[in-house]
Amino acid sequence: MKRIKLGVVGCGAIAQVHHMPTLIDLHEQFAVTCVCDVSAGAAQYVAEKFAVPRWVTDYRDLLSSDIDAVLLCHSDPKTEAALAALNAGKHLLIEKPVCFSLQELDALLAAQRAAGVVAQAGYMKLYDPAYELAKRQVETMDGVRFVQINHLHPNNALHLAQFDIRSFNDIPETAGEQRRQALAAARQEAIGEAPPHVERAFHLLAGSMIHDIYGLREMLGMPARVVSVEIWLEGRAITFVLEYGPDSSAPGARAVATWVDLPDLWDFRETLEIYGDDRRVSLSYPTGFARGILSEVVVQGIDAEGMACRIQPAVAWETAFRRELRHFADSIHGNAEPRAPLSSARDDIALIIDIIKKAQDAE
């Protein structure tokens, strides 16, 4: 099968820790022909480390090169580069958050339809073997009643210190200012004027808790309403309650979700617990900046003899990032339907906006 010529925009931590090593490992599916970063030092370093023949500092130069597809994993917002990639007829894998407003997402969907290309959200945890195990358990659960999500997040620097990640102090001031203005405009379009603590909560939902939001949507469907929201710790923490209606797979259920910034605690915790009439399914993720650490699934219930039981299924070793990229290749070749199309990201953006609006209404 023909290798996909791929360009990568963004040469920061996620590219250096996960995407580039995985793409090199998947050399039969992908050939990375160009990398791009506004930091010339980062682009050159990644190109040399991973034997990429060309590096540039302007994504438009990357799009004009000989590539079939683009991976966007640069700093937010990514909408401008994503639209340019789609308008250039390139297949697209865009890291979360895809964007911040429904208007941005609708523009991306229109560009994708016009181009007739694959456009996939970077929802890598959907491909985690542990998530897939947990999802199968939930699908056969007798009546989902309650969901608990806890996302306790330390400073990423605590985990990144174990990797050889290079950064360079050479980003042009104009590029930084353009990014800040674009980010403010996207946020304004999404949620309007908001105090600083609400803005911080909005960005943590879109940038980190998005993993929990899309994972829950894939398992249970969209909630009927946001019951309540509390933003605390000056926007470094948020708790919200969702109600599921008759159109979901968990009618009448409630989900309670919390994200808390614990900057100096090494112990990252991200857990999803789903309780039904006949069993409890618990899913635990490692930090996204981990390699070789598996997620875990625990199922508790009653066996055929009426005894309480607890099982912990074995989880496959293949990483979520690798499985995501393999699926992207299969989708481009027409061998699979995208599991995380941009259209699905629209539901997540809408829910995040609803959560923030509920918090604003309560203040």
Image (tube, rainbow, N blue to C red):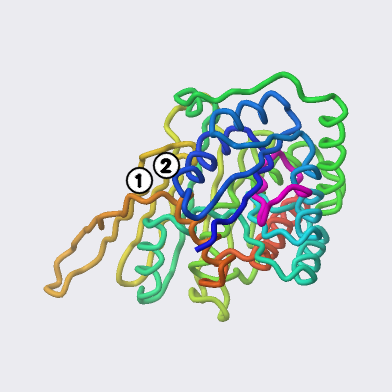
Amino acid residing under circle 1: Leu
Q: Which residue is situated farthest in the left direction here?
A: 305
Amino acid residing under circle 2: Pro
Q: Position of residue 162 (x, y in %)?
A: 45, 24
Residue 202 lies left or right of residue 323; in this view the side is: right
The residue identified by callout 2 is 286
Q: In the rendered view, tell whether residue 334 sits above or below residue 313.
A: below
Q: First in sequence: mark 1 or mark 2? A: 2
Residue 248 lies in what quarter of the image? Answer: bottom right
In the image, residue 75 lies in the stretch drawn in magenta: yes
Of the numbered discs in the image, which one, if any, rests on residue 294? Answer: 1
Kindly check if marks 1 and 2 are in contact, taking CB atoms under 8 A apart as contact: yes
Residue that appears at 46% across and 60% down: 147
Q: In the rendered view, tell whether residue 142 sits above or below residue 127.
A: below
Residue 346 lies in what quarter of the image? Answer: bottom right
Say which of 263 and 4 sits in front. 4
Say which of 152 and 53 sits in front. 53
Residue that appears at 42% across and 46% down: 285
The magenta region covers: 63-78
Q: In the rendered view, tell whether residue 275 sits above or below residue 159.
A: below
Q: Position of residue 216 (x, y in %)?
A: 52, 62
* Dot 1 crowding, Cα within 10 Å, few <14, some 14–19, many 20+: many
Secondary element at tag 2:
loop
Residue 53 lies left or right of residue 101; in this view the side is: left
